[in-house]
Amino acid sequence: MAEIFQLTPKLVVPDGAAALAFYTEALGAAVEESYTVDGRIVHASLTVGALRFELKDAGDGDPAPTPGQHPPVLMSLGVTDADAVTDRLLAAGATVVYPVSDHDYGSRGGRVVDPFGHHWMVSAPAGTLTPDEVQARLDALP
């Protein structure tokens, strides 16, 4: 059986050049490659440390998220400092969906939406809980 060796999210955005600028500023991403056809980005690959994601301009059957509607996929960032990373995202133009706070399941995090309609969950560990402890805390919620 063939081995799957990678899963890379690809974000469809209405303005690829603006998205590249946002992600390099907000996340410290490095643009590894970017290809255009008729001025539209058809493929760009970005890295943040050892992590990789891609983006492309909307078109060719790939629509960007509609403003005000929740996209069907969430981007989830595991970080060491949820407040600092969220602050960088906000400074670059993201807006708060859920403010950063401590959660019953043992993490500190929040959610923002970037200028292109994609939701980013930002989460840092806030302790070491076993799966049973996490479930017990969630079961105890009103």
Image: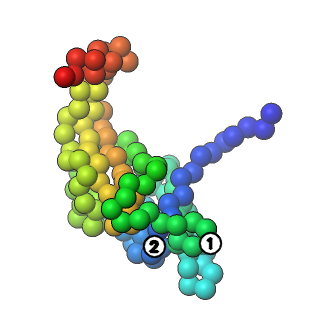
Placement of the N terminus among the 4 image quadrants: top right
- Residues packed near mark 2 inside 10 Å, few (<14), some (14 to 19) or many (20 plus): some
Q: Which mark is residue 14?
A: 2
| Quadrant of the rendered image containing residue 141 | top left
Label 2 secondary element: loop
Asked if residue 35 lies left or right of residue 67, the reply is right
Q: Can residue 18 be seen in this view?
A: yes
Q: In this view, does 134 lie above or below 36?
A: above
The quadrant of the rendering that contains the C terminus is top left
| Image-quadrant location for residue 127 | top left
**Residue at 25% of width from left, 52% of height from top?**
97
Q: Residue at x 23, y 64 (%)?
A: 91
Cβ atoms under marks 2 and 1 closer than 8 Å:
no
Of 105 and 65, the residue lying toward us: 65
Query: Image point 23% across, 55% down: which residue?
Result: 96
Measuring from the top left, give residue 30's x and y in whole percent.
46, 64
Q: Earlier in the sequence, mark 2 or mark 1?
A: 2
Badge 2 amino acid: Pro
The three-letter amino acid code for the residue at tag 1 is Asp
